[in-house]
Image (cartoon, rainbow, N blue to C red):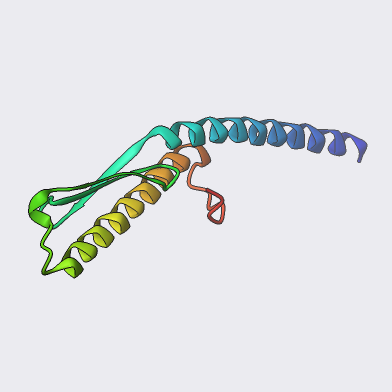
Amino acid sequence: MARGGFRGMGNMNSMIKQAQKMQKEMAKLQAELEEKTVEASAGGGVVTVVATGKKEIREIIIKPEAVDPDDVEMLQDLVMAAVNEALRKAEEMVNTEMGKITGGLNLGGLF
């Protein structure tokens, strides 16, 4: 009985080491993702948004032809569409990169 217990402890130690390694890799990747960016545009490219892997907007570019004082709502819609697409792409990038480390484990949106 004791012999089986020791073998179980070895497996537990191995699992703990693997979890610690994964945790370090994930922390490193999170730092890298904060610097990586994704880009999305709307209206045929008249509004472009750049977002980071931390899901922060880094830049919004609006071409002059998108600015129509008589149709501000259209510009607002284009900005919103580009921002939402950029954030979706950032989320997808984070999930893809984290999946490489976690081997597809579902960690319940930890990142």
Q: Is residue 39 above or below residue 7?
A: below
Q: Position of residue 78 (x, y in %)?
A: 20, 61
Front residue of 1/56: it is 56
Q: Position of residue 10 (x, y in %)?
A: 78, 31
What residue is shown at x 18% (from left), y 62% (from top)?
75
What residue is shown at x 88% (from left), y 34% (from top)?
3
Quadrant of the rendered structure where residue 73 is? bottom left
Front residue of 18/111: it is 111
What residue is shown at x 22% (from left), y 65% (from top)?
77
What residue is shown at x 42% (from left), y 48% (from top)?
55
Front residue of 19/45: it is 45
Q: How many marks?
A: 0
Quadrant of the rendered structure where residue 4 is? top right
Front residue of 48/16: it is 48
* Image quadrant where one finds the N terminus: top right
Q: Is residue 14 above or below residue 81?
A: above
Q: Position of residue 87 (x, y in %)?
A: 35, 53
Residue farthest along the left direction in this orientation: 65
Determine whether, in the image, residue 1 is placed left or right of residue 18.
right
Quadrant of the rendered structure where residue 25 is? top right
Q: Is residue 79 above or below residue 73?
A: above
Determine whether, in the image, residue 81 is placed left or right of residue 17.
left
Q: Position of residue 101 (x, y in %)?
A: 50, 37
